[in-house]
Image: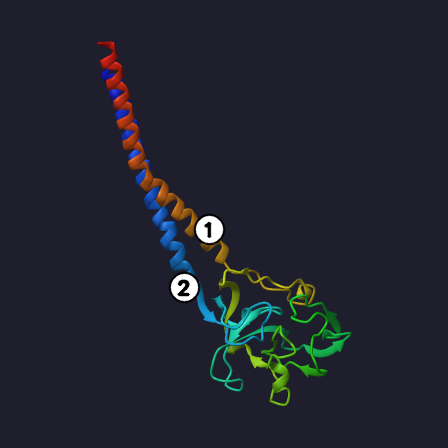
Amino acid sequence: MSGTGRTGDGHGRLGSKLSGLAVAVGCVLFLGGFAWAAVMYKPYTVPTESMTPTVHAGDRVLAERIDGSQVRRGDVVVFTDPTWGDMPMVKRVVGIGGDTIACCDKGRLKINGKAVEEPYLQTKDLASVSDFTADVPKGQLFLLGDERSASLDSRVHLDDPGQGSVPRSAVQARVDAIAWPLNGMVGRPQAFASLPGGVSSPGPLRLQLAAVAVGAVLILAGAAYGPIAARSARSARSRSERATAGAH
């Protein structure tokens, strides 16, 4: 009898240690995931409908803090340029330094003479409501909104120095996800993947969210062990007492 008691006691102590470890690891993952995301990402509110249907006015997006040198064609970026205004703006990069951007080839945008498909456009096969050509200087970016019929973008500034482009240094972040409403991740368009430099890789947001989710599960599981173990112990004692009473 005494040996059985010691075994049960040992199992209880082991369970308590494991539940404590689960809570500790869960807290590290949960808080660490949030802290990592806070360092890497910044929330922005999209000010206009110029990026419809990818993001809408008033949407809350999570944008990865990056250096302008990391920007690739197809990225949706947050930038501030005095020529465009004092507030952060959200547009899609369609051209980088050295590119020649032209429109339109059967409604499609041409980059260095190659027509690209843009499935994210608000109006299919309408890359621009008017024809244009621009040469992007080195170190600059050419930006368009996905709602090409209404977006005030690089096309409006074609007569400015740089033919509507902005310096890479103007970029503050790259949009990775729409946080509110919960519309999920903003993908990298494969239309630009075959061009020199390819497309950018997604940020670590999925990994950070996974860390937070796993941490939450471990915390809940570890915290639930105590009450569950106590209830099991009470049930076992109750059964043992009934058995003893029945024997007498």
Q: Position of residue 204 (x, y in %)?
A: 49, 58
Give the distance between the C-alpha atoms of the residues marked 2 and 1, in whole angstroms: 16 Å
Q: Nearer the viewer, mark 2 or mark 1?
A: 1
Give the secondary structure at mark 1: helix
The answer to which quarter of the image holds residue 240 is top left
The residue lying furthest to the top in this view is 248
| Residue visible at 57% across and 61% down in the picture | 201
In the image, residue 185 sits, relative to residue 110, either above or below, namely above
| Residue visible at 48% across and 53% down in the picture | 207
How many residues crowd around disc 1 within 10 Å: few (fewer than 14), some, or many (20 or more)? some
| Residue visible at 61% across and 84% down in the picture | 164
Q: For mark 2, what is the residue?
A: 39
Three-letter residue code for mark 2: Val
Q: Quadrant of the N terminus?
A: top left
Q: Position of residue 168 (x, y in %)?
A: 54, 76
Q: Nearer the viewer, residue 125 or 247?
A: 247
Q: Is residue 73 left or right of residue 241?
A: right
Is residue 111 at all visible to an observer of this figure? no
Q: For mark 1, what is the residue?
A: 210
How many residues crowd around disc 2 within 10 Å: few (fewer than 14), some, or many (20 or more)? few
Give the mark, 2 or 1, whose residue is nearer the N terminus. Answer: 2
